[in-house]
Image: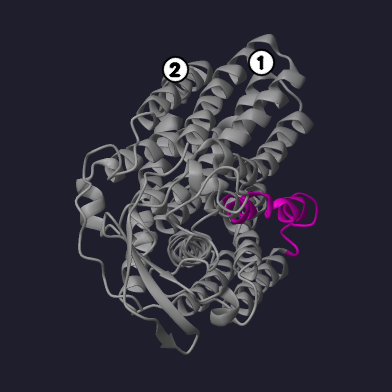
C-alpha cells in the first residue's frame, strides 16, 4: 500500500530561524510540511530523548493507578476507611486524570501552558496527591487531594508525554507512542511489590511521602528538557509526500499515511471519525477497567488461591504495558486500524476465556486468559493516541486527543460502578459475558474508522495555520 500521489509546490526560498533554515512544502490537498530543520538544530541532540524522557515520566506516575489496588487494605486500616471509600478515591482519580486532557490541550495549543510548565505543574500536583493520601484521615479531603489534585497532575503528565512523542515522530509514531505508553502500566510493578511486602500501618506515612517526592523529582527533572517542535515540522531527510514500504524509514508511512491536513477540534468532530473514536474508546476502556477491577475478586470467588489471584493481576499489569509497545510496533507494519481491531477482538475473546477458565476451575487457563486480557486491555490506548494525529494532524493533537481520551471519563463509571451493579445482578459469569459482547461491538465500530480526506470525502483543502 502506498500513499496517494501528491503534487507539490514549495514556497519561494528558505526562511532562516534560530534553528537554521527551512522551506515549506504544500501538497495537492493544502497540507504544509516544514522541512529542513533537524532535531539537532532544534534540541541540540537527537530527538530520541523525546521518547526516553516521556517514558520515564510515564513509569513514575503509573504508581497512582496500577499500584493503588495493592495499597487499599493498608490505607483502609490506617485511615479507618471502608473498601467503598478507597474505591471511590481511585474512581475520582481516573475521572480527573482523563478529564484534564482536553482543557490542558486547549491551553497548550494557545500558548498559555507550555509542555514544560504542564509537566512542572503536574509533578507538583502528584506530590500533593500522595501527601493527601498519607496524612488526611477525612475521606472527603483525601478524595479532593489525591482524587482531584493528584488525578489532574497525573493527567497533565500523561497527556503531555503522549502528545510530545507524536509531534517528534510523525513518521513512526506507532512504535514510539506504544513504547512510551507502556511505561504507564509496567512502571508500577516495583510499587506493587512495595505495597504488598513493605507497606503497613506503621510506615505508610514515610512510604507515601517518599513516593510523592520520587514522582516530583523524576518528572520535574525530565520536564526541564521538554520542548515542542515548530508547527508543521517534519524530520529532515524523510520525504512526507513520497514513501514506500521498501524504505525502512518510511515503511510506516506506507501503511499509515500522514493526515491530509491539520484539523481543528470542530473540524475533526464534523468528519464523524472523532466521535466514532470516542464511542469506541468508551466501550473498550470500560471493558479494560472492568477486568482490572474484578479479576482478583472473580478468582477468589471461583476458589483459586490467593497466589493465583495476585499473580493474575501482576501478569495483567506487566503484559498491559508490554502489549502497548508490541502493538505500537505492529501498527507500523500492519496499519493502525488493523492493529486496533485485532487488539479489541483479543480483549473480547479474553473475557469469554476467563468465564471458561473459571467454569473449568483451571488455574493455568485462568492465568493465560489474564495474560490476554492484560494484553488487549492496554494496547488500544497507544493505538488511539497514534490514530488521532494520523487522522487529524499534529498541530491540534493535544486538543483532539484530549477529546478522544475523555471517553475514559465515562469508562471509569461503566467499567467500575456499572460493572459492580451487573456483577450483583447477573453474577461474574453474566458480567464477563456482557463485557466480551461489548468488546466485540467496539471492534465492529473500529472497522468503520477511515482517514478523513482519503477516498473522496472531506478532501477539500483548507487554509493552513501559520507555522511557528
| Element under disc 2 | helix
Give the quarter of the figure containing the C terminus: bottom left
Which residue is the site of mark 1? 357
Q: Is residue 128 above or below residue 414?
A: below
Above/below status of 186 relative to 121:
above
Residue 62 in view of the camera: yes
Residue located at (66% from left, 15% from top):
357
The boundaries of the magenta stretch are 178-203
Residue 426 marker = 2
Q: Spatial distance from mark 1 to mark 2, Cα to Cα?
A: 18 Å
Q: Which residue lies most toward the top here? A: 360
Q: Nearer the viewer, mark 1 or mark 2?
A: 1
Image coordinates for residue 203, horizontal then vertical, percent? 75, 65
From the viewer's side, name the closer residue of 227 and 248: 248
Quick one: label 1 or label 2, which is nearer the N terminus?
Answer: 1
- Out of 73 and 223, give the one closest to the viewer: 223
Residue 140 horizontal side relative to residue 225, left or right: left
Counting other residues with Cα less than 10 Å from the Cα at mark 2, is it few (<14), some (14-19), or many (20 or more)?
A: some
Amino acid at each position: 500500500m502506498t500513499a496517494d500521489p501528491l503534487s507539490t509546490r514549495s514556497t519561494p526560498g528558505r526562511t532562516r530561524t534560530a534553528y537554521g533554515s527551512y522551506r515549506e512544502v504544500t501538497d495537492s490537498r493544502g497540507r504544509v510540511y516544514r522541512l529542513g530543520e533537524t532535531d539537532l538544530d532544534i534540541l541540540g541532540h537527537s530527538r530520541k530523548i523525546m521518547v526516553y524522557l516521556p517514558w520515564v515520566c510515564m513509569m513514575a506516575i503509573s504508581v497512582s493507578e496500577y499500584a493503588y489496588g495493592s495499597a487499599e487494605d493498608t490505607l483502609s486500616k490506617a485511615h479507618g476507611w471502608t473498601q467503598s471509600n478507597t474505591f471511590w478515591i481511585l474512581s475520582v482519580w481516573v475521572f480527573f486524570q482523563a478529564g484534564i486532557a482536553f482543557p490542558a490541550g486547549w491551553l497548550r495549543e494557545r500558548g498559555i501552558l507550555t509542555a514544560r510548565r504542564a509537566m512542572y505543574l503536574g509533578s507538583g500536583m502528584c506530590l500533593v496527591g500522595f501527601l493527601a493520601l498519607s496524612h488526611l484521615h477525612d475521606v472527603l479531603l483525601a478524595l479532593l487531594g489525591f482524587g482531584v489534585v493528584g488525578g489532574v497532575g497525573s493527567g497533565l503528565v500523561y497527556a503531555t508525554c503522549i502528545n510530545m512523542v507524536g509531534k517528534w515522530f510523525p513518521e513512526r509514531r506507532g512504535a514510539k507512542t506504544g513504547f512510551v505508553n507502556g511505561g504507564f502500566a509496567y512502571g508500577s510493578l516495583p510499587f506493587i511489590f512495595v505495597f504488598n511486602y513493605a507497606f503497613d500501618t506503621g510506615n505508610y506515612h514515610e512510604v507515601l511521602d517518599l513516593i510523592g517526592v520520587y514522582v516530583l523529582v523524576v518528572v520535574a527533572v525530565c520536564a526541564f528538557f521538554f520542548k515542542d517542535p515548530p508547527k508543521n515540522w517534519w524530520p529532515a531527510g524523510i520525504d512526507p509526500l513520497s514513501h514506500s514500504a521498501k524504505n525502512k524509514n518510511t515503511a510506516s508511512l506506507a501503511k499509515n499515511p500522514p493526515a491530509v491536513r491539520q484539523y481543528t477540534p470542530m473540524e475533526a468532530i464534523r468528519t464523524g471519525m472523532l466521535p466514532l473514536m470516542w464511542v469506541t474508546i468508551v466501550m473498550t476502556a470500560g471493558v479494560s477497567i472492568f477486568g482490572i477491577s474484578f479479576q482478583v475478586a472473580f478468582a477468589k470467588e471461583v476458589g483459586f488461591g490467593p497466589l493465583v489471584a495476585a499473580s493474575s493481576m501482576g501478569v495483567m499489569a506487566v503484559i498491559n504495558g508490554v502489549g502497548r509497545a508490541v502493538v505500537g510496533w505492529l501498527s507500523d507494519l500492519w496499519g493502525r486500524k488493523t492493529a486496533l481491531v485485532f487488539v479489541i477482538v483479543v480483549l473480547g475473546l479474553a473475557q469469554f476465556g476467563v468465564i471458561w477458565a473459571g467454569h473449568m476451575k483451571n488455574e493455568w487457563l485462568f492465568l493465560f486468559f489474564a495474560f490476554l486480557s492484560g494484553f488487549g486491555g492496554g494496547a488500544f490506548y497507544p493505538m488511539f493516541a497514534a490514530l488521532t494525529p494520523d487522522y487529524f494532524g499534529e498541530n491540534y493533537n493535544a486538543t483532539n486527543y484530549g477529546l478522544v481520551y475523555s471517553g475514559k471519563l465515562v469508562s471509569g463509571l461503566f467499567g467500575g460502578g456499572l460493572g459492580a451493579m451487573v456483577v450483583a445482578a447477573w453474577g461474574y459469569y453474566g458480567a464477563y459475558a456482557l463485557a466480551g459482547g461489548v468488546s466485540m461491538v467496539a471492534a465492529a465500530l473500529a472497522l468503520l474508522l477511515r482517514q478523513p480526506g482519503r477516498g473522496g470525502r472531506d478532501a477539500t483543502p483548507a487554509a493552513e495555520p501559520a507555522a511557528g
